[in-house]
Image (cartoon, rainbow, N blue to C red):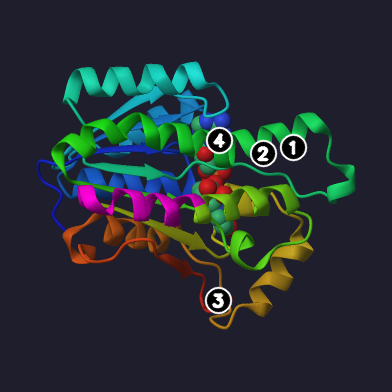
Amino acid sequence: MIDFDGRTVVATGGASGIGRATVLKFARAGARVFFGDVNAEQAAETVAMADGARGSLDFIPLDLADRATIAAFAEDVLGRAGRADIVANIAGWDRGEPFMDNTDEFMDKVIDINLHGPIRFTRAFLPGMIEAQAGRIVSVSSDAGRVGSSGETVYAGAKGGIIAFSKSLAREMARFKINVNVVCPGPTDTPLLRSQPERLQEALQRAIPFRRFGTPDEIADAILFFASDMSAYVTGQVLSVSGGLTMAD
Ligand SMILES: NC(=O)c1ccc[n+]([C@@H]2O[C@H](COP(=O)([O-])OP(=O)(O)OC[C@H]3O[C@@H](n4cnc5c(N)ncnc54)[C@H](O)[C@@H]3O)[C@@H](O)[C@H]2O)c1
């Protein structure tokens, strides 16, 4: 197991799916973890699941579509921990529907949660990392952002934005020894995926070379790799964890 003793991790989306699996892995590997989410009830379940972990796991309410809560989250963590060593942008949201049916309100929500929010969340922790000349930023995008996905047009645009943002940030932050990388899950067995129509789920499984969905733990492993010293010389990269569904360059 990779060791995160003494590292402070801030993460989003820890109340469910990939985010939950990730914050639990970090805490069990010794990290001091602070995570934000809109779902306080399920976040409390995640915290309970970390019972007995070597590190610690704290929940702080966060709505990525509300910039005031991002600022409050950062102020709270920086007040308690001084700075973050690792930022993990994991939360995301979408509802599949044809682009021409999307309302303005829906498009704003998708872009706020999947693009504006992670950009603001990341920026809030960069001053401390720049000062320390160290840090890891890992953002969860989607293969939709690499190869497109019909019915997820605005989401794919936001996720593609995360990739371009991360590559550019990786270039700017390299001189401060801050690594910035992206994990793109393929279809992964989480509540987000299970909310899709049954027929779509079956078709997806048939199309995946490994003939099964990914598990949240398998995506979390890729996030921990980018957050660890095992990827010290890797920056600006995008890793699809998709059972071979996508093989983008
Ligand atoms: N499951 C998949 O097949 C899949 C595929 C590709 C990419 N992804 C991406 O992986 C990430 C995790 O998704 P998941 O499948 O675990 O989904 P999930 O729905 O299980 O978990 C997402 C979490 O984000 C939180 N969240 C939603 N809106 C928020 C907001 N405004 N502010 C703060 N938190 C908010 C939710 O409460 C939830 O805890 C997302 O970025 C998603 O886009 C998932």
Q: Which residue is mark 3?
A: 248
Label 3 Cα crowd, 10 Å radius (few <14 / some 14-19 / many 20+): few
Which secondary structure lies at badge 4? helix
Q: Which three-letter amino acid code belongs to the residue tagged 3? A: Ala
Q: Main secondary structure of the magenta part?
A: helix
In the figure, 153 relative to 235: above or below? above
The residues tagged by marks 2 and 1 sit, at their Cα atoms, a distance apart of 5 Å
* Residue name at image x 59 percent, y 65 percent: 146
> Percent from the top left, x then y, of residue 176?
21, 47
The residues tagged by marks 3 and 1 sit, at their Cα atoms, a distance apart of 26 Å
Image label count: 4
The numbered disc on residue 60 is none
- The mark that comes first in sequence, 1 or 4, is 1
> Percent from the top left, x then y, of residue 157?
66, 52
Q: Viewer-proximal residue, 28 or 76?
A: 76
* Residue name at image x 75 percent, y 64 percent: 200
Q: Which three-letter amino acid code belongs to the residue tagged 2? A: Val
Q: Which residue is mark 2?
A: 110
Q: Which residues are magenta?
A: 165-177
Horizontal relation, residue 92 to residue 77: left or right: right
The numbered disc on residue 107 is 1
The residues tagged by marks 3 and 2 sit, at their Cα atoms, a distance apart of 24 Å
Q: Quadrant of residue 131?
A: top left
